[in-house]
Image (spheres, helix red, strand yellow):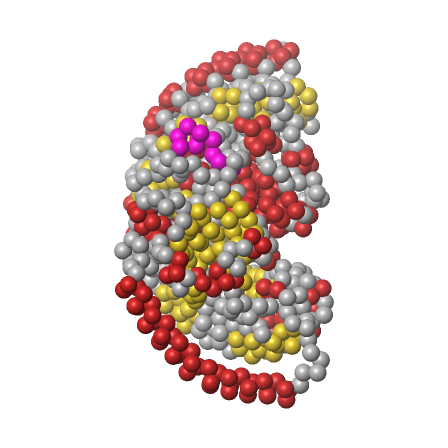
Amino acid sequence: MLSGEISSSFITNWTQLISLQLQNNTLTGIIPSEIGQLTKLNILYLYSNQISGPIPAEIGNLKNLVQLDLSMNAITGPIPSTLWNLTQLEVLKLYSNNLNGTLPPEVGNMTSLQKFDVNRNQLEGELPNTISQLKNLQIFQVYTNKFSGSIPNDFGQGTYLDYVSFSNNSFSGELPPQICSGLSISYFTVNGNNLTGPVPACFRNCSELVRVRLEGNRFIGDISQAFGVHPQLVYIDLSGNQFSGEISPEWGDCTKLTMLNMAENRISGEIPKELGKLTQLQDLRLSSNNLRGTIPPQLGDLGLLFNLNLSNNQLSGVIPSSISNLLKLQKVDLSANTLNGSIPQWFGDFSNLIAMNLSHNQLTGEIPFQLGNLNLQLFLDLSSNSLSGSLPSNLGKLSNLENLNLSHNNLSGSIPSTFSGMNSLTSTSVDFSYNNLQGPIPSTNLFLNASPNAFKGNSGLCGAKGLPNCDSTLTGISTNRRRTRNIIIIAAVVPIVIIIILITITSLILISRRKPIWGGGRSIGRSDDDDTSQKLIWDREGKFTFKEIVKATEDFDDKYCIGKGGFGSVYRAELASGQTVAVKRLQISDDYPAERWRSFESEVRVLTEARHRNIVRLHGSCSTKGSMYLVYEYMERGSLGKVLYGDGEEMGWRERLRVVRGMAHAVAYLHHDCNPAVVHRDISVNNVLLEAGFEPKVADFGTARLLNPDSSNWTTVAGSYGYMAPELAYTMRFTEKCDVYSFGVVALEVMMGRHPGELITTLSSSSSSLVNEEDLLLKDVLDQRLPPPTGQLAEELVFTVKMGLACTRVNPESRPTMRSVAQELSAQTQAYLSEPFHSITMSKLTSFQK
């Protein structure tokens, strides 16, 4: 293997060369300007080295050059204008460098070009319309750059076009209508842009398609009309768009499919039984749509399936027995539907299953003891159903399980002592809350140190932190006597309660007639203090009065204050019912305009409807003279900042990656799934809260504002210092891209264990006085309190840092959308490390991979 620099003398001694191939070595230094003397060269290969510096302008002298490949180096600067004079070029590959600048119109002069690949650089600006003149193109790849604007309208009319990728840029507008008119395209990827409109009609007849990625855009249209029968199709991802309509039975004729992802759209209708014909399918994701009906039994014919995700739809009926044939399943997620019946025992036969989520359905019956035979590793979530009976002791065999959630059911009996053998669970990754469990908690550190929230709502449990002490003299007889006494008390109290309710309702009616609520009798509004004490704070799961909050906080005594900020204070309120909430008290001036009150009311109504696992639930709101109150669910761990800077070692790399992924999904939900979209405006480590298992929840919508489609202009800058996008200094306009920047800062901060401001400045500055980014190693930037990551964990971490850097680009248009960020971070496979982890420099990470 060759090393060292390419010497000028070496070149000048070989001026008659026709082919110079020095690829796959460890050559360093720059490309000598003398390269321009090799005027007879047809082929120049320098790819896969460590060459730096710019491409010399003298390369334009190589008029006979047919193939030029400088990819996979560290070449910087713009592409010299002289290069576009090489009109004989058929192959031009400059990918995986640090090239910047734009593509000029002169690129259209290279009419012989067949392969054009400049992916993974920092090129920007719009693509020139002249690329449509390249009629001989077979491969055109510009993915993972900073390109913006629209794709030229005439692009794609050549008959040879095969590989096309515009992914991970900031392209907008619609796809060219004739982009696949040649019907020869096999690989087409435009994921991670801002493209809109329908998919061009020519796609329906493009029978050569093999791989298609459209995810993370804003495509619309009837999905049944956009695509036809594609017999060669192996992989298609349409997720994270706005497709509507129903899934066509014709998809069943795409028999080579191994991946079908239509998640996060607006697709309705039923799942067609014809999908059962896709016997090569390995990954099926239809989650977060409006699908209804039952799960077709024919899905049981997909014998190679390892991932099945039908969550967040309106599916009903029982889980079909044919699913028992899917013995290769590794992940199954049927959560957030209306499935009924019992959990089938045959789930215990899935020996490859590592993650199982059946939560938020209407499942009944007992938990099958056969689930203890599984090799579950990631999670078992059966929460929010109507499961009954006792906990199977057999579940204690799940020694590799990392997260267990059985909350919000009707489970009874005790927690089996065998659960002590679930060695991979932690005190923050178990949840038995809101059942009818009783008896002592197993006497192991796992349960004794668990958060009290893991057991709340089980009045009979005892012996752990936050629970009563166990009474060893308690007998079944005394228990029965107590039950009898309770029945007698209930029989006596119920009539009294009914009378009190009737009196209260009558009083409220009289009060409301005598003293109308400020602003026209809205359900949320400003009122006198006496009125407000009875106003309701509500959400889908119950309601309570403002008076209860005042009582729980002793009229907002400072001892209940758990945080203060520029917008107000936050208090912890433990209600008489046992529910704990966080109350944000905002100080409002007396001359607060009426139209702002109405806007506030509208926003709260929208936000109380927001349902996402990574967003702190807003129960509701109320207001009094001079104050506005937002009532949120309470998070025991507190803020991400508190945990990160309190004892960062408690957060390992795996937990930190989980935090960043969860944040990405939360912000993507606000930007792309709320209507109208919500811009948070103040994402920081203090506005991300952590629950058990380090699952993050984005909080503090006291500063969020709904982004109307016709306006993004706010003149009042909110936000936390160090997290605000640089463009706010001169535009004063909050957009989704400002949130993207703030997210990137937090993502880097989580990985570094400190604020990344200096790093961001260094990497975005051209000043030579700053730290040389070529010498800045990733391993030195990361939180030094943790050991360096290895294996797949290292790959995921590198990819996450890349995404964080991409989100903090100075130009807001070059930042990815949060939907594309969330999807890329959740992808099953991350980019392969092309070099040892300890040698990766920050310069390699300044543009994230495809």
Residue 235: x %, y % from top left: 45, 50
Q: Please give the name of the residue rendered at 33% of the width and 27% of the height, measured from the top-left corner.
A: 129
* Residue 728 magenta-highlighted: yes
Which residue is nearer to you in this view: 680 or 560? Answer: 560
> Dividing the picture into quarters, in which one does residue 159 lie?
top left
Relative to 690, is 430 above or below? below
Q: Please give the name of the residue rendered at 44% of the width and 29% of the height, measured from the top-left corner.
A: 729
- Quadrant including the N terminus: top right
Which residue is nearer to you in this view: 742 or 203? Answer: 742
Task: Left or right? Give the position of 268 relative to 717.
Answer: left
Residue 149: x %, y % from top left: 36, 32
> Dividing the picture into quarters, in which one does residue 434 lie?
bottom right
Q: Which residues are drawn in magenta?
A: 723-733
Q: Can residue 136 be seen in this view?
A: no
Which residue is nearer to you in this view: 307 or 82? Answer: 307
Residue 284: x %, y % from top left: 46, 58
Q: Please give the name of the residue rendered at 51% of the width and 69% of the height, measured from the top-left corner.
A: 577
* Residue 128 magenta-highlighted: no
Q: Please give the name of the residue rendered at 68% of the width and 35% of the height, measured from the top-left corner.
A: 780
